[in-house]
Image (cartoon, grey):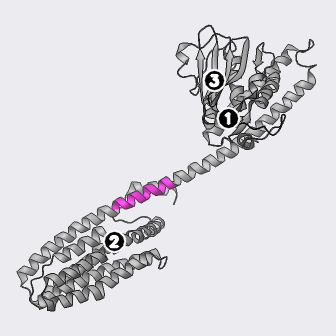
């Protein structure tokens, strides 16, 4: 069944408690499985109940009648219920076959109660008929039988009771009075069983729709993951080719003979590469593709990578980046690649939006944590941005009008959260801003795998 068929079934309704053939088969299979689960506590409770009735017969009925009623309960009713309880916990028979046996057990249990009433009438003992009402209610509500099965069996039991009373010679008015109350109880049970099954069928449709939507969401997520992975590679390839071509066409970055148009093209390519990186970072976060590989991470290689990366990425922008390599002797518990992306985003945010000429990156130990900080000497943040700066699509005004998405600081917040850290900003209008990241420090520090070593993190393995 697909979503359209399920919605059509919901729209047309099912007052006769029937679905379309394919869906009906699926529903009955599910219903039979649930009945088997329900039968386990119900059959155990029923067995205990009939054993209590047997004890009460011994205590309250005449000895001759008690011998017969107890024999019926212990020889017929209790063994039938015990067999049902035993089968309910076994893999065989099938759920559909068990449902039929369960219904048959209800019928036999009702017949045993009718037999006890008949024996009592034959011995001229005024045993009340209320036991039949209990049996009817037990079949409709406690056992949870389907509406059709419960109704047919209950009507058969009421008819059997009527015939037994006729056989015992009970006066007609008394029979009709008892039959009236039994039929009233039966009608109440039928209405309750119909309502219960209708609700159960409606819940079944809702659950089927929900399962289909979950499957569709999983399929869509998988397709998005495949698209993001392919696009991340395919869109970066032409940029790399263009970048290499520009390098071959120009005399060299910063040399006197370099064409201003060529410089602008290089800056545009760098900006586009960073923009694509932001888009793919955001997409991976939304799809749950980013998982932090947290380990003891020395800051020294991270700071060196920042030096190398920014020397190539800042291009013609007249900004001085000061990295305090003395503070890079510290270690943090973090994902190396995620941490590098966090620092890159903070530095580029300062370059493009602060309006400052100097940006400084340093770290300091604070108790059992390490605080990494990117400061600038720019204009500071306007007061209206301070509370929403790390929210998606929030962009400040900078000295350049380059297009952006306003996702850089949001990605910083998400990456830092994945590494179990916190981040924030301290700013003063006219005196610059200080963006900080607080990460846990390892309890003990051990030497890294080598001064120039570089190990792929979980994020890098996912991005490759």
Across and down, in percent, residue 388 comes to 54, 22
Residue pointed to by mark 2: 42
> How many C-alpha atoms fall within 10 Å of the one at disc 3: few (<14), some, or many (≥20)?
many
Q: Which is more N-terminal, label 2 or label 3?
A: 2
Across and down, in percent, residue 16 comes to 34, 65
* Label 3 residue SS: strand
Vertical comparison of 235 with 49: above or below: above
Q: How far is mark 3 from mark 1, CA to CA?
A: 20 Å
Q: Is residue 104 visible?
A: no
Foreground disc of the pair 3, 2: 3
Q: Are marks 2 and 1 in contact (CB under 8 Å)?
A: no
* Magenta-drawn stretch, dominant element (helix, strand or loop): helix
Q: Nearer the viewer, residue 241 or 113?
A: 113
Give the quarter of the image for residue 463.
Answer: top right
* Label 1 residue SS: helix
Foreground disc of the pair 3, 1: 3
Residue pointed to by mark 3: 436
Q: Nearer the viewer, residue 436 or 218?
A: 436
Quadrant assignment for the C terminus:
top right
Q: How far is mark 3 from mark 2, CA to CA?
A: 62 Å
Mark carried by residue 281: 1
In reply to whether residue 136 is colored magenta, the answer given is no
- The span picked out in magenta is 198-211
Q: Which is more N-terminal, label 1 or label 2?
A: 2
> How many C-alpha atoms fall within 10 Å of the one at disc 2: few (<14), some, or many (≥20)?
some
Residue at 19% x, 77% y: name it: 131
């Amino acid at each position: 069944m697909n979503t359209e068929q399920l919605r059509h079934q919901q729209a047309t309704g099912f007052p006769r408690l029937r679905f379309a053939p394919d869906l009906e088969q699926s529903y009955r299979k599910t219903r039979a499985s649930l009945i088997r689960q329900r039968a386990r506590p119900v059959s155990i409770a029923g067995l205990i109940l009939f054993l209590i009735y047997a004890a009460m017969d011994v205590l309250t009925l005449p000895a001759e009648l008690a011998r017969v009623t107890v024999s019926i309960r212990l020889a017929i009713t209790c063994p039938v219920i015990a067999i049902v309880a035993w089968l309910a916990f076994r893999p065989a028979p099938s759920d559909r076959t068990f449902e039929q046996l369960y219904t048959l057990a209800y019928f036999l249990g009702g017949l045993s109660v009718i037999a006890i009433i008949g024996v009592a009438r034959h011995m001229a003992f005024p045993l009340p008929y209320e036991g039949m009402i209990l049996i009817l209610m037990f079949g409709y509500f406690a056992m949870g039988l389907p509406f059709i099965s419960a109704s047919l069996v209950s009507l058969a039991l009421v008819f059997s009771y009527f015939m037994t009373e006729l056989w015992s010679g009970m006066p007609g008015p008394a029979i009709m009075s008892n039959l009236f109350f039994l039929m009233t109880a039966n009608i109440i049970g039928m209405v309750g069983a119909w309502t219960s099954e209708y609700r159960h069928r409606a819940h079944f449709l809702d659950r089927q729709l929900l399962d289909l939507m979950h499957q569709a969401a999983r399929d869509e997520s998988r397709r998005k993951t495949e698209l993001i992975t392919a696009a991340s590679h395919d869109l970066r390839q032409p940029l790399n080719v263009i970048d290499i071509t520009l390098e071959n066409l120009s005399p060299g970055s910063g040399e006197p003979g370099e064409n201003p148009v060529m410089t602008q093209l290089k800056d545009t390519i760098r900006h586009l590469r960073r923009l694509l990186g932001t888009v793919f970072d955001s997409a991976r976060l939304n799809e749950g593709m980013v998982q932090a590989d947290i380990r003891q991470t020395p800051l020294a290689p991270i700071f060196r990578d920042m030096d190398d990366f920014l020397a190539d990425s800042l291009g013609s922008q007249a900004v001085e980046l000061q990295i305090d390599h003395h503070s890079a002797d510290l270690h943090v518990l973090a994902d190396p690649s995620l941490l590098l992306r966090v620092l890159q985003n903070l530095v580029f945010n300062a370059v493009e939006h602060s309006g400052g000429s100097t940006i400084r990156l340093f770290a300091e130990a604070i108790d059992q944590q390490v605080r990494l900080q990117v400061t600038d000497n720019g204009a500071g943040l306007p007061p209206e941005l301070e509370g929403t700066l790390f929210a998606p699509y929030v962009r400040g005004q900078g000295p350049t009008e380059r297009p952006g998405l306003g996702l850089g600081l949001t990605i910083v917040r998400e990456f830092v959260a994945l590494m179990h850290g916190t981040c924030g900003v301290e700013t003063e209008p006219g005196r610059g801003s200080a963006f900080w990241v607080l990460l846990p420090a390892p309890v003990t520090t051990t030497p890294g795998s080598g001064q120039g070593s570089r190990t792929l993190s979980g994020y890098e393995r996912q991005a490759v």
